[in-house]
Image (cartoon, grey):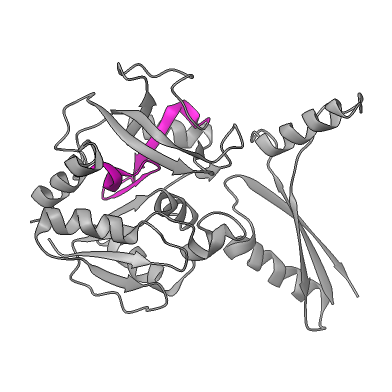
């Protein structure tokens, strides 16, 4: 599996996800600077990492979505290549129109950095195949703008097409308002594109993908990709 | 020529910041505030030219970058 991580000014989880990818694939991913338009065409996976690209100016992810490297990401996504956006990466993918909806300020107005519980809502994807159906995963969030919004038609399409990948839930797997950390519509924490080759999620799987970090509930995403793309 | 772009959240989109502003105003004793919505203003300094062409160009800027049409709407004022 040949992977690349796009690095923007203000990215701060690029190295964390690179470590997770290297542990999974056995080789380091290509670190691709945002200003370089010439993204290699033979990539199996492109990761848009977490952080605060361009200082969240204008809107979170807005500037990064229009950067030179994103043209290559669009082309790759259109060809069916896997694209994974984590946290700020999810915001970038929504801003770029590769995923529907938008991520607004958390309803509490607070920046939230803590572990949350996610229910795996579909295992029918190259990202989630290594989870069990309805498995509850403990994965950290660290964001100010994670409040997912979409119009009714988009919400219905996501639901009907089995494109909601993760929902915030209680440790027992119940999807409740109390378990929703940021006010996201329908407790949505991650969604798939229509073709299921693009996943955006607010939680950080790369932060709990090694026992030394206190958990491995994020690792199945990388293992799923490795199996699907190798 | 100056263009002032007013970007606001679409009606129906919850605005947690606006809500906090309304609550803060109420806490300060401004009883009559039923609701508040927060937006932003972007001022552009444009090369002088035809007003309708400027309007079209600013619309295109809004479409490509300044406004996220999923959640926001906008209004443009041109002057000078």
Decide whether residue A205 is among the magenta residues.
yes
Q: Residue at 28%, 70% (x, y): give it.
A: A31
Locate the N terminus of chain B by quadrant. bottom right
The location of residue A116, given as percent across then percent down, is 37, 30
**Rendering quarter of residue B47:** bottom right
Q: Which quadrant is the C terminus of chain B positioned in? A: bottom right
Q: Nearer the viewer, residue A97 or A136?
A: A136
**Residue A86 visible to an observer of this rendering:** yes
Report whether residue A162 is seen: no
Relative height, residue A31 to residue A187 (above, below) = below
Q: Quadrant of residue A48?
A: bottom left
In this orientation, which residue lies closer to the viewer: A166 or A194? A166
Q: Left or right: A214 with respect to A144?
A: left
Please give the count of numbered marks on the rendered protein: 0
- A32 relative to A80, above or below: below
The residue under the point 46% across, 26% down is A180
* Residue A147 lies in the magenta stretch: no
Q: Is residue B75 above or below residue B14?
A: below
Position of residue B4 in the picture relative to residue A189 (left or right): right
Q: Position of residue A135 (x, y in %)?
A: 22, 25
Q: Height in image: A210 above or below A56?
A: above
The residue positioned 69% from the left and 64% from the top of the image is B59
Residue A186, image quadrant: top left
Q: Horizontal and vertical percent for residue A86?
A: 36, 49
Q: Which residues are magenta?
A: A183-209
Residue in front for this viewpoint, A77 or B15: B15
- Image point (16%, 49%), residue name: A225
Relative depth, front residue between A228 and A10: A10
Query: x, y percentage for residue B57?
Result: 69, 72
Toward the front, the furthest residue is A212
């Amino acid at each position: 599996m040949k992977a690349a991580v796009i690095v923007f000014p203000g990215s701060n989880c690029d190295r964390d996800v690179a470590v997770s990818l290297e542990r999974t694939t056995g080789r380091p991913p290509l670190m691709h600077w945002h200003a370089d338009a010439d993204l290699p065409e033979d990539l199996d996976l492109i990761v848009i990492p977490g952080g605060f690209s361009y200082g969240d100016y204008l809107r979170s992810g807005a500037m990064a979505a229009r950067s030179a490297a994103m043209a290559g990401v669009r082309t790759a996504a259109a060809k069916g290549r896997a694209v994974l956006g984590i946290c700020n990466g999810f915001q970038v993918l929504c801003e770029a129109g590769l995923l529907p909806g938008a991520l607004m300020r958390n309803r509490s107005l607070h920046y939230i950095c803590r572990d949350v519980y996610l229910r795996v809502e579909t295992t029918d994807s190259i990202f989630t195949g290594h989870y069990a159906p309805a498995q509850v995963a403990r994965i950290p969030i660290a964001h100010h703008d994670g409040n997912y919004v979409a119009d009714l038609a988009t919400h219905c399409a996501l639901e009907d097409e089995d494109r909601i990948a993760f929902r915030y839930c209680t440790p027992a797997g119940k999807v409740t308002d109390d378990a929703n950390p940021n006010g996201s519509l329908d407790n949505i924490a991650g969604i798939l594109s229509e073709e299921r080759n693009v996943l955006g999620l607010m939680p950080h799987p790369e932060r709990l993908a090694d026992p030394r970090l206190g958990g491995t509930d994020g690792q199945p995403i990388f293992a799923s990709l490795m199996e699907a793309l190798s | 020529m100056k263009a002032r772009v007013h970007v606001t959240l679409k009606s129906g989109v919850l605005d947690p910041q606006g809500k906090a502003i309304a609550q803060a105003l109420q806490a300060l004793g401004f009883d009559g505030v039923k609701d508040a919505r927060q937006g932003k203003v972007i001022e552009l300094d444009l090369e002088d030219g035809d007003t309708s062409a400027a309007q079209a160009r600013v619309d295109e800027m809004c479409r490509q970058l300044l406004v996220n049409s999923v959640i926001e709407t906008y209004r443009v004022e041109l002057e000078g």
